[in-house]
Amino acid sequence: MNSNNIPTDEDFRRAESADAERNRGLSEVSVQVLHRFGKNDVYQVFMFYSPRVDTFGAFIFYRWDQQIPEAEKSGLASRIKEAILEELENVGRGDRETIRVDFEFDSHENVERNYEGDYFLRLR
């Protein structure tokens, strides 16, 4: 930063590079998991990484509220968790035995009902 606390072009380049590394492979993980489980009414998958706590956040949205407990009972939720760990490993984000992921399951129905259909608001 310069003396006026205004970021320089180099500051922006470093920030963009850090952001790209933080998000490396996460969109591919989301796409692969959605591809594998879309037929099971998985509607959206969002992946984030927090370097502060060295943990990934996986947000899996089914189409309907009732599918959340059904997926847990049927083992679908466990299969999705395993697939996310596998895909994170595939994109070079670590060993599946040591990768830390906080999983959250929700529904598109809930996003529509409580967040005006806005996933950004839901994920904040």
Image (cartoon, rainbow, N blue to C red):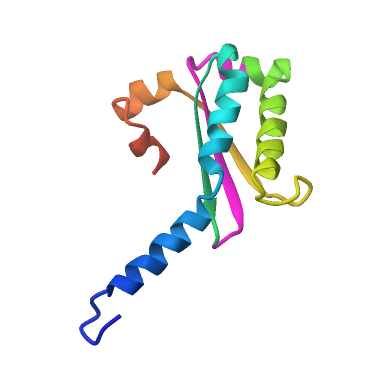
Vertical relation: 81 (above or below) 74: below
* In this picture, residue 15 sits left or right of residue 96: left
**Residue 100: horizontal and vertical position, in percent?**
67, 49
Q: Quadrant of the N terminus?
A: bottom left
- For the point 26% across and 83% down, which residue is it? 2
Q: Quadrant of the C terminus?
A: top left
Q: In which image quadrant can residue 58 be found?
A: top right
Vertical relation: 41 (above or below) 89: above
Q: Give yes or no for residue 62 being in the magenta stretch.
A: yes
**Residue 97: horizontal and vertical position, in percent?**
79, 47
Quick one: which residue is furthest to the left in this view? 4
**Residue 121: horizontal and vertical position, in percent?**
34, 38
**Residue 66: horizontal and vertical position, in percent?**
54, 13
For the residue pair 56 and 15, the one nearer the viewer reads as: 15
- For the point 41% across and 18% down, which residue is it? 109
* In this picture, residue 44 sits left or right of residue 12: right
Q: Give yes or no for residue 99 being in the magenta stretch.
A: no
Q: In which image quadrant can residue 14 be found?
A: bottom left
- For the point 38% across and 26% down, which residue is it? 111
For the residue pair 18 and 96, the one nearer the viewer reads as: 18
Q: In which image quadrant can residue 112 be found?
A: top left
Vertical relation: 74 (above or below) 21: above
Quick one: which residue is furthest to the bottom in this view? 3
* In this picture, residue 83 sits left or right of residue 116: right
Q: Give the extent of the magenta segment.
A: 52-69
- For the point 35% across and 38% down, which residue is it? 120
Numbered marks: total: 0
